[in-house]
Structure formats: structure tokens, C-alpha cells
Image (cartoon, rainbow, N blue to C red):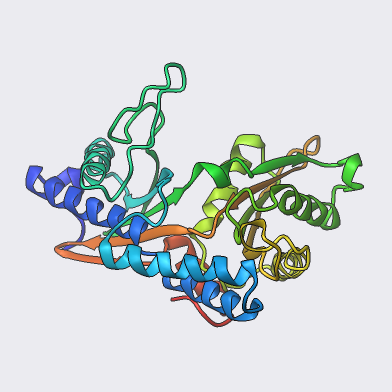
Amino acid sequence: MGYTGASGGGDGEMDKLQETFVELLRRAATDLPKDVEEAIERAHGEERRGTPAHSALGIILQNTASAREESAPLCQDTGTHTWYVHLPDGTETAPLLKAIRAATAVATKKAFLRPNLVDSVTGTNTGDNLGAGHPLVHFRPWKRDALHVDVLLKGGGCENCSSQYALPEARLGAGRDLAGVRAAMLDAVHRAQGLGCAPGILGVAIGTDRAGGCAAAKEQFLRLVHDVHPDPKLAALESDVLAHANRLGVGPMGFGGRTTLLGVKATALHRLPASFFVTVAYMCWAWRRASVSVQGREVRFSQMSQLARTLRRAAPRRGGGR
């Protein structure tokens, strides 16, 4: 028996799904993915003892352990919530959206999430993290008889460090090629400095239009720290930018040091001849994501998104992650 969804399930099934989504949000907000934690541990070991960089990473690791133990938010900014819902073709989406919104309110009430959402006109806090455009939910029908849901939390401070470039960019000497893309990516890191709560992660979309680039760049944060892009050119670009960014000396929280970025994740999409956009999304060290699969009565939580699974099948991983 697969996922029956709204086409075959009743209120009882939706209530159980709501409970599942509350737990998914708890895990996303309080339990840093193992691959991210291991990357921070490695960075901590590489920074010189007694330096602000070493101290900052040590505090981050202590905070990570405490948040997991106490089911408390990793950061006071529990961020905007982006959901990626893979569902059987033909499933009604309205009941799923209702369950997601209800779970968001419950998770806020239980203090897994802070009430961070405010009305852009009045400044009034909604109190439950529900409002116009939030949470953002992407529904993706597929042929499988199961439900898979990924949720991503992204704080406002690191979102402020995201940027978009239209190539060519004379200021950078960046043309419409991968060398120009590289220049834009490194410029984004340099401009962010420590303001995005470094060490950060870059999610990069090459091509498409402005709106599509923002969505695709953010989706790259569903990948694992040490995965390898199946396209050799993009894999080389990711590795090169990561190495050069970590020689900029920005370091954790902008204190200087060897670890400015934990990872670089890029994708390339088709574009119109008139436009060449490079969209750079910046994620802070609190790279919060969680996943759940539902098939029949079986519910499986993990730290492996559908995108990560797809890339893992397409290319080998470079150590770490799970």
C-alpha cells in the first residue's frame, strides 16, 4: 500500500501527516545535519588554537550539541521555510498545504520555531509564522506511490547576503562564460564578509531568468556538503571557488581564518540569448534541512533530500555526509 493522500485518505490520515510535519520542522530547526556538523568539526580542527576563528567554531559546535539535546532552535532566527513536496500524480494539494500550515503553527507554539514572521506593511508579527507567501511550498508530482517531503530553513541575515549578477559585469571584468561566473561567485563571498554568519555555503544558479535563478540557487541547499556534481565542469567550478574563497581570510563570523565557506553548490539552466544571470544564494553555517518519506503506514525521517538522492545516484561522493 502506498501513500493514499487526499484522494483516498480521510481526516485521520491528514492529522497523522500534520504530526509528521511538526516533527519534520522540529528536526530541521534543532538538529543540524550530520554532514554539516562534520564539516564544521573539520574546520574547527584546521583553525589555529587560541584564534577567534577557532573559538567561534567551537561555540558553534557547543550550540549544535545543546540545540539537539534540548530540542531548541539552532538559531534565534528560525528563518523562512521552503517546502519541496514530491507527491503521487493526481493527489490533491489543498489538504497537504493545510497540514503544512497547521504544523507550522503547532511547531511555533511548541517553541521549535520562533514567531519570526511580520507583515511587510504594518510590521505586525503574525505570531504563528503564517502569512502571505509563507511558508513557501513547491509541489512536484511524480509517478511513485509515496510522499517525500524536504524542508529548508533559511535565516534573514544570510538571505541579505544573497545576490544576483547580469553578465557581462564590467566592474568584475566578468564575461559570459564560466570564468565570469567564477568572478561573480567570489565577489559575492567577498561582499558578504562575515555578515551572513560565516562559514557559509553558496547555492548558485547559472542562467534562466531572475525569478528562476533565485529558486534554483536556494534549492542547491538540499544537497550534501561533500557531494560531487555529475557535470565535470560544474564540479570543477565548485571545487575551485571553495578553495579560493577559503584563501580570502574572511573566516568564521568575519574574524579571519581559513574557513570562509563550507561548500559551494551550483546548477546550470538554459537561458535566453539576451540574458546571462548568475544568482548566488548565501546560507549561514546553520544549514538547516530535513526530509521525510511516507509510504503507507511507514514514515521515515532522514537528512537526505530527493535532490541529494538523485545526485548520489549520478556521481560518487567525496567522503562525509549521510
Q: Which residue lies furthest to the top in this view?
A: 122
Residue at 32% from the left image edge and 48% from the top image edge:
89
**Left/right of residue 228 with respect to residue 76 in the rendered view:** right
Q: Is residue 304 among the parts visible in the rendering?
A: no
Q: Which residue lies furthest to the front in this view?
A: 50
Q: Nearer the viewer, residue 173 or 46?
A: 46
Q: In which quarter of the image is residue 255?
A: bottom right
Residue at 62% from the left image edge and 62% from the top image edge:
252
Quadrant of the frame with the N terminus: bottom left
**Left/right of residue 128 with respect to residue 239 in the rendered view:** left
Residue at 63% from the left image edge and 48% from the top image edge:
195
Q: Position of residue 179 (x, y in %)?
A: 85, 57
Q: Nearer the viewer, residue 166 or 143?
A: 166
**Residue 82 to residue 312: above or below:** above
**Residue 66 to residue 91: above or below:** below
Q: Where is residue 181 in the image (x, y as percent from the top left)?
A: 79, 53
Q: Position of residue 112 (x, y in %)?
A: 28, 51
**Left/right of residue 181 with respect to residue 224 in the rendered view:** right
Quadrant of the frame with the C terminus: bottom left
Q: Is residue 39 among the parts visible in the rendering?
A: yes
Residue at 72% from the left image edge and 67% from the top image edge:
246
Q: Where is residue 149 in the image (x, y as percent from the top left)?
A: 34, 55
Q: Quadrant of residue 74?
A: bottom left
Q: Quadrant of residue 198?
A: bottom right
**Left/right of residue 18 with respect to residue 235 in the rendered view:** left
**Residue 223 to residue 165: above or below:** below
